[in-house]
Image (cartoon, rainbow, N blue to C red):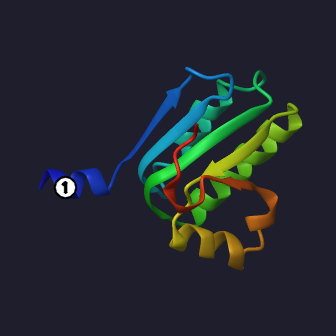
Amino acid sequence: MPEKAAESSLTVEIDRSRATPVVRCTGRLVAGLSDRLYDQVRILVPGPKYIVIDCTHLSRMDSTGLGTLVRVYVHAKSAGCNIQLMNIGPSIRQLLRITELLSAFTIIGENNIKLG
């Protein structure tokens, strides 16, 4: 039962140990949960020139999650900050590709390579 609860949730943690903050997402970026990501990124902006969103443990994203990524992107960009997506999985990459949003983001950490 605890596994099912973990699958239906989203955890967002911020690592500020570097000049570029890393926002780690675990779980599902879906309707009803996606505001957690926006709220955490919003408190970082304005500030750093870059913010990394680590998608290593992001298992699913729906259209609401996609909308949240766009909202995060626009909010950050308007403050002079760039959003980078790290370790996006195949299904999220495909969603970004078919919506023609893949090129809007800088993708780093291909093949689950951790940030230096």
**Where in the figure is residue 93, as x and y percent of width and height?**
61, 69
Name the element at disc 1: helix
Residue at image x 76%, y 47%?
73
In the image, what residue type sits under mark 1? Glu
Taking the image as shown, residue 114 lies to the left or right of residue 11, namely right
Q: Which one is nearer the viewer's eye here, 44 or 65?
A: 44
Q: Give the quadrant of the C terminus.
A: top right
Residue ranking furthest to the bottom: 98
Q: Which one is nearer the viewer's eye here, 112 or 82?
A: 112
59 over 19 or under it: above or below: below
Residue at image x 88%, y 33%?
80
Residue at image x 55%, y 41%?
37
**Where in the figure is residue 89, as x and y percent of width and height?**
51, 65
Residue at image x 57%, y 31%?
40
99 over 43 or under it: above or below: below
**Where in the figure is residue 69, as x and y percent of width and height?**
66, 52
Q: How many numbered discs sit on the rendered protein? A: 1
**Where in the figure is residue 111, as x and y percent of width and height?**
53, 62
At label 1, counting other C-alpha atoms closer than 10 Å, the crowd grade (few under 14, some 14-19, many 20 or more) is few
30 over 81 or under it: above or below: below
Residue ranking furthest to the left: 1
User: Which residue position holds label 1?
Assistant: 3
Q: Give the quadrant of the N terminus.
A: bottom left
